[in-house]
Image (cartoon, rainbow, N blue to C red):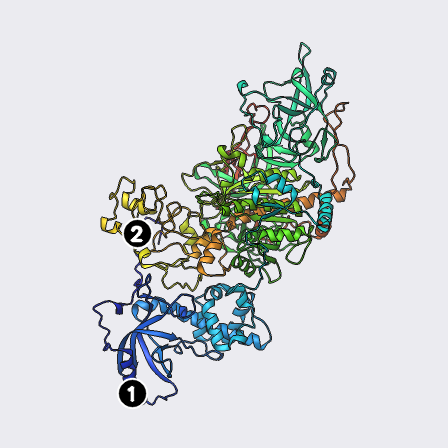
Amino acid sequence: MSMSSTVRVELPESTLVTPKSCYEPFEPGAPIISEAEAARRLLWAAKQAGQDDSFIEFQLDNFAVYCDKEHYPEEMKSLHYLDAKQGSGTLFFDGQLSVGNTAFFVKRVAITALPIDNYGNLKAHTVRGKIWLRSELNKTREIYYCLRTPAFEYRRFFKPFLWVADLAKHFVDFLKVMEDSHRKVSIFSFRSTFDTWIRRAHKNAPEFVAWREQFPRNDFRGPIVANINFLHKEAVGVLGYDSTYSHTLWSETLDCKRYKPFKAAAENPSTVVTQYIYDCFSHLPFGDRLEAVPLSKQSQSLRNNLIHRRNLELPAPIHNASKSLSTAGTQQIRDIRPGDSISTTRDEVESGSKWKREMPHGFNDVDRWFALVQKVDVDRRGRRSFEVIWYYRAVDTLCALMKYPWNNELFLSDHCSCKETSKVAEDQVLGVHDVEFGGSSATQAEMFCRQTYICAERKWITLDKSHMRCKHVEQTPKSAQYQPGETLLVVLDKSTGRSEPCELVTSYSEDREEIFRFRRLLRRNRVDTSNARPNELVTKRRLREGCFSIPPPYDGDGVGGFFYITHMEVLEEGCRRFLPLESFPTSLKQGYDPTDELTKLRGLDLFCGGGNLGRGLEDGGGIEMKWANDWDAKAIHTYMANASSPHAVAPFLGSIDDLQRLAIQGRFSQRVPLIGEVDFISGGSPCPGFSNLTNDKTTVTQRKNQSLVAAFASFIDLYRPRYGLLENVPGIVQKQASRNQDVFSQLICAVVGLGYQVQFFFLDASSCGSPQRRSRVFLAFAAPGLCLPRSPSPTHAHPPNTRSRTLGNLPTGEPMAERAMPDATPFPFTSAYAATADLPAIYDSKPNTCIPFPDHRVSLGLTKQLRTKINLIPTQPWGMNFAQTWFGQGREGPGKGVLTPAERLFFTEDTGSSLCRTGINSNAYGRQMPNRLIETIVTRPSPSDAKNGRTLHWQEGRTLSIMEARRAQGFRDDDVLVGLSADQFRIVGNSVAREVAVALGVVFREAWVQSLANELIEMKSSEVHIAATSLPTPSDSDGTTQKFDGRSSDLSLAVEEAISSQNSAGQVPANRITPDSTPPPSHFSREKRRSGSITVEIRAKKSLKTKRSESPGSTTRYPSVHGGVVEPSPLGQAACVLDSD
């Protein structure tokens, strides 16, 4: 199918589901008689031809194999499903049996066996011509029907079977050879070993080469898993049970018993949490599900040691009720100096303030605001007022109305009073307070402050002495943000909405404007071959030396904003050519090299599912998953089948509650990591408890699902990792009516209360390169002193007409988060068609086998009734569903569409319910839009679902295939999914989009590498202070004593390990370009001539003054992309495009 305006009609060879022989009239060209009579006559002919009684063979031509069940009447089936799939039932064949010139046509012959020869014979390169059927009639005698030419309509079923049959021969031969060599075969043996062996065994035999060319990869795990039942049947039949089961492959893929489940003591266990987490979450509707389990002495000792090293909050009973605060006397107020912490009455709503008076759970001291004095102003009448930086309390932040554990904690903000009209007057001061900076909840001071809350970005970062001086009071010199040789994304034409990769050549000032001169890099798919990937660039200089392969994340078509170069532009005799790159200019700053040594964060992957989140984070380059947990055996075995090696990850198959209980009790093992070993924790807790697709979120099951957010938080409390990430659906963030039950805000309270830096991301999968409509929220956190990851920058545009979206509410009425709407991106959105264009048409998917893409098959049974309904939904115009087909495209009324009243009877009646699948507003039986995003992939395609029924292929008569769902979710083509088709689709639907995971992995790597570099700088300069030090105040004064506790960091150990590879974030192999501050190559040309490369000059505008902020937290919001350079960049929008000569 082409997406151009040209109409092309492709007619498949056949799409018949029922054999022609089942229709009347039917004339086969040979007499139609019973099988018994045909066997009697042909047996005589065979003996006349000299066949031995020990093996009698009839030829079978013009045959079709089919099942005959209630929902699948007389539907053709591929032969490798015979006795290989549970519930497949009896298969029959119709066909012409012959011996020599004697031929008869038989019908409805029951098949009992499928004998195949040539196993164990490496000189035989195929089983074609050596495949027979054995019927029920002949099960006690040696009469076999040799398969020759299938019926025309059965070809599409028989051809893939022949490929699978040859696969079975090679597979069984491989098992035998490996057994003879005393080597066990696992799923990992098929990643490359199997292919190497069969190539050596069969070399260039024509039959083998023709078979091998049909599968385009060296990794055979996909075909093995897709046909595991047939392969198992053949292996047992040829090698015997004991020999077959001497290999671990079967426990890894067939019965999924390789990794033993932990036996839970109770069928419906409580959600196990630490005491701190119990205290934070127990007031929520799922509180009765929580069980606080005390730590063993060993676990407590390990955790406390880790807490001291990472400067986190020690275990203590929470105290969130309001506390009495001191009031200031007249003299104390007169003595206020810069550096003092004061409180003042909050602004009333009547004053015009946007700040609503809200009382969080268990805390009512909300009528005062706190501030850090920066400057004392005295007017002509001698009245004093104060310029301040405002402190925020938990209720002023994302914590909102939820229970914050410490009633004595303040957060310094980046919001000052400098641009506000009204100042804090001396007579408005309520108190002068003793605040300990860098302290903890156990402080002896009135209050403590250890973090800064960045208002516009909605994040907490570790308090730094620079935060204590307002930027308006003390200007600090700005260092150059960009350096020559770096690569930036530049908007060359605002009307296109695209940004282009350019190399920064130089920058300078002219007439108070900062000018940046760039050299544009050309995209290869625009100047050379259209088949090049969208993130492949070309350079202009003829280079030398060798080339490199393209590893993740550079191979993701721009996911994460990564570019690479493999070709160069060469001008020879006036002709432009593009030749393979041989080396790279040494002057350019390149992206990081994934092969460089780096001390990676050791990860624990909770709710790991099939591993798409964990693997994507690993692809970012800074994390290595060491432990994984999920309760689903199919998911865990999928996770392990895709691990780099069998022992790379230690899986815990069982409830997260059991895993946590073991760790709390100190029962550590290979599968239960020791406290102190885990650097990173990630998880996508079950979303049905918060999803809009769940109709009733108050059931016992959904309350349990909701409580698992607390289980995740408890792992943070127990293991105290350096970094972590939680994912869930946007529905976890409550709207105005339910803000007092916001589980996400409560999670933020708990994590910030432990002393972690925290940031909230709201990401669209499509903005990260996924071809799917899927929005998710993420909570990223980092231990004190580490670099907190930035929010991933959008790399792909939104589809046309995408609306803005906000989540939650703050006391100011602003949203907690909103959809990023960038002015420009380097790539367009990836449409459903673009993501699946290379997948072959499978029409109704009835053969259920696609050789080049083994998962390109549907996951649910397409019954005759369902196929009829699907085929009644038009394929044009795009995206039709039942409601549009019956009520009209504008849904004018019943019968206004193209569906006839007779055809309407195939669907259920309209009950009038809002959830009725045939109602006027229903989305049931909807086709996808090829030029739009794929709708959100869920755990099971349900065409009749009124909410999420847009599951049909845009052109073919079926639901989306597993492979198409994989593409939507970003699974790599060589990833393996184990289990039945329904299990595989469920694993895909439960996953996090890989593109989003990679983008997040990239920012975590950046943050971790920068943290290592910062620590290394401190170590080298001998400026690391382990003892507590005093934090300078804005001016010398006798005001409030404010103390800053120095941090002792456990980063030193990691830094020492990383010293040898400290440049891992700097230089890379010659063909890799990373986003933001990593440059593509320049175009150095000694000949002055016009060419395809251009130089771009960007003139920066003068900085704009911000509008007056509201006390104490309204801040100016900036667009996600500033001017001409994709975020983060201050460059203006004016661009001068110059020729390179």
In the rendered image of this protein, does residue 195 appear above or below residue 746? below
| The furthest residue to the top | 381
Camera-near label (1 vs 2) is 1
Tell which of 760 and 616 is nearer to you: 760
Q: Mark 2 points at which residue?
A: 7
| The furthest residue to the left | 25
Pick whichever of labels 1 and 2 is earlier in the sequence.
2
Please provide percent x and percent y for residue 62. Answer: 30, 73
Q: Which mark is residue 44?
A: 1
Please provide percent x and percent y for residue 587. Answer: 62, 47
- Few, some or many C-alpha atoms within 10 Å of disc 2 (few <14, some 14-19, many ≥20)? few
In the rendered image of this protein, does residue 112 appear above or below residue 828? below
The amino acid beneath tag 2 is: Val
Please provide percent x and percent y for residue 202. Answer: 49, 75
The amino acid beneath tag 1 is: Trp
On the picture, is 261 further left or further right than 956?
Answer: right
At horizontal 29% and vertical 80% (from top left) the residue drawn is 36
In the rendered image of this protein, does residue 1115 appear above or below residue 195? above
Q: Can residue 57 be seen in this view?
A: yes
Tell which of 797 and 1031 is nearer to you: 1031
